[in-house]
Image (cartoon, rainbow, N blue to C red):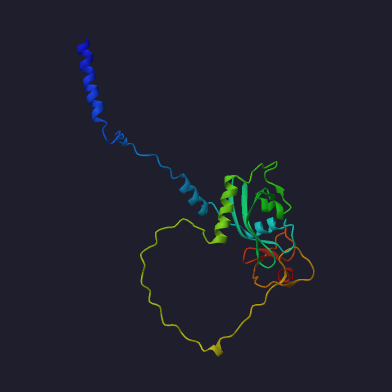
Amino acid sequence: MKRILLAIAIPATLLLASCSGDKGPVAAAPITSTTPLATSSKADTSTAAGQASDARCAPATAELTFLVSSGLSKDGFELTNGTVITEGGLTFYGATTVDSGGKMENRSDVWVIKDNLVYSSSGGARNTTIWTKASDAPLKISAGDERVKAVDQCVVNITTGKNSAPTTESPASVAVTTPPAVIIPESTVPVVTPQAPIGFTGAPNGAPAPLSGKTVAYCMDGPSYQPGTTAFTDGTTGWTQECAS
């Protein structure tokens, strides 16, 4: 029995001696694994989604912009960059609020329209218009709704120049020969200065005045509009003498 124990002890002693010496304990070799580490691109995807415009976004009509802007609570404010997502009988309308001088007040706000009734969704929309909150009954749509956030991002992208629509592969370029330009003497070119329309861009207040920078797109003559209601080429609406006459 003693011989068996001695036979076991000697190899164990030799094994311990080979793992130690004057240089101290030998560090264990690192364990390597052939299993690839799990990676996630969730953060990158969310960042990209935050910069891209939703494919459902489309330009809003002048009539819809006029409907929403009719609830603006501050004189001289107007809405521009009108953008919509329409889904399931609901229209999610996003726009930029600017003052009478064209200065941006709110980069992007969102309203929800159902059956021609307007509801305010974003905080800025609730602060600058008289419309009921969309988060209340009957809609109960929160500002965190996916469609609200999507149309809001589309408007933000318009104002920051990051609007990214789906791209298609461009065809091979074709060389085009441009004919030489014909130079017309300056004295023969008539100079025509367009006259600014006379009216209002917000709630009528005081006498009509020239609307600098505005160009009439068409007169909104429908039975639901007051005489003189005008749609401008920049997507905003107002009242002009041209359409009232």
- At x 44% / y 83%, what residue is drawn? 181
- At x 21% / y 22%, what residue is drawn? 11
Query: How far from the left and from the top, in percent, is residue 61?
Result: 62, 58
Q: Please state, as top left, top right, bottom left or bottom right, where the C terminus lies in the image.
A: bottom right
**Residue situated in front as seen by the camera: 15 or 182:** 15
Query: How far from the left and from the top, in percent, is residue 150?
Result: 56, 50
Direction from residue 186 to residue 212 in the image, left or right: right
**Residue situated in front as seen by the camera: 235 or 159:** 159
Query: How far from the left and from the top, in percent, is residue 180?
Result: 42, 82
- At x 39% / y 39%, what residue is drawn? 38
Q: Is residue 201 visible?
A: yes
The image quadrant that residue 191 belongs to is: bottom right
Query: How far from the left and from the top, in percent, is residue 125?
Result: 68, 53
Residue 78 vertical placement versus 141 (above, below): below
**Residue situated in front as seen by the camera: 9 or 30:** 9
Residue 199 vertical placement versus 73 (above, below): below
Q: Please state, as top left, top right, bottom left or bottom right, where the N terminus lies in the image.
A: top left
Residue 108 vertical placement versus 204 (above, below): above
The image quadrant that residue 235 belongs to is: bottom right
